[in-house]
Image (cartoon, rainbow, N blue to C red):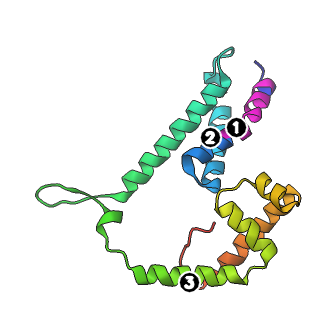
Amino acid sequence: MTQLEFNYHVKEQYEPLRGYAFKLTRAIEDAEDLVQETMLKAFNNKDKFAPGTNLKGWLYTILKNLFINNYRRKVKYLIVHDDTERQYLLDNLNSADKNKGIGRIAMQEIDRAMGTLPENLRIPFMKSFEGFKYSEIADELQVPLGTVKIRIHVARKKLQEALDCYGVDYGIK
């Protein structure tokens, strides 16, 4: 298989990989990152692919392994080693007391910022946030796919600007 043929067949799997990545991550941006990382790894390791075998299965295995490695990395980051006599491992997310007041204020600020968005930006952004695909949003709103992408991008930027003065990352990226 030539490099050109390999590239063509790998790129054909982009959309199916994206769907699988979304099922694993449940976040559009994380799924996009995972697929891009998978594509990069596939192109860099073309010599390890045995021609005549299942390319789709090979790509799905790469994606799944990357997801598992990223998950393990995140879990390892969240675990703190306690040097007390009994050598307990603590999960620092569950052991810390949550300040519900700060969470409520943050949600009020996000709601306020969302209220400032025009409806033509807010609706596509919320649909995207709820997990709808860009194509589904475009079909429902009866606008071109590119328009949906631009509106979501502009909505994110406006929300980031509105919430930037608080110095808090609300995960809108």
Q: Is residue 7 magenta?
A: yes
- Magenta segment, which residues? 5-17
Kindly report the distance in space between the C-alpha atoms of the residues bearing marks 1 and 3.
Answer: 38 Å
Q: Tell me if residue 99 can be seen.
A: yes
Residue 54, x across and y down, in percent: 65, 20
- State left or right for residue 12 relative to residue 96: right
- State left or right for residue 131 relative to residue 104: right
Quadrant position of residue 121: bottom right
Q: Which residue is painted at 66% across and 49% down in the image?
A: 32
- Give the amino acid at mark 3: Gln
Observer-nearest of 3 and 17? 17
Observer-nearest of 43 and 162? 162
Q: Main secondary structure of the magenta part?
A: helix
- Give the amino acid at mark 1: Pro
The residue singled out by tag 2 in the image is: 20
Kind of element beneath mark 1: helix
- Give the label on residue 108, or none: 3
Q: Is residue 137 above or below residue 73?
A: below
Observer-nearest of 120 and 29? 120
Kindly report the distance in space between the C-alpha atoms of the residues bearing marks 1 and 2.
Answer: 6 Å
- Give the label on residue 16, or none: 1
Question: Residue most toward the left?
Answer: 85
Q: Could you tell me if the residues under marks 1 and 2 are in contact, i.e. CB atoms within 8 Å?
A: yes
Residue 161, x across and y down, in percent: 68, 80
Quadrant position of residue 109: bottom right
For marks 1 and 3, the one nearer the N-term is: 1
Q: Quadrant of the N terminus?
A: top right
Residue 165, x across and y down, in percent: 60, 85
Q: Is residue 25 above or below residue 105?
A: above
Q: Is residue 62 above or below residue 129?
A: above
- Give the amino acid at mark 2: Tyr
Q: Tell me if residue 40 can be seen.
A: no
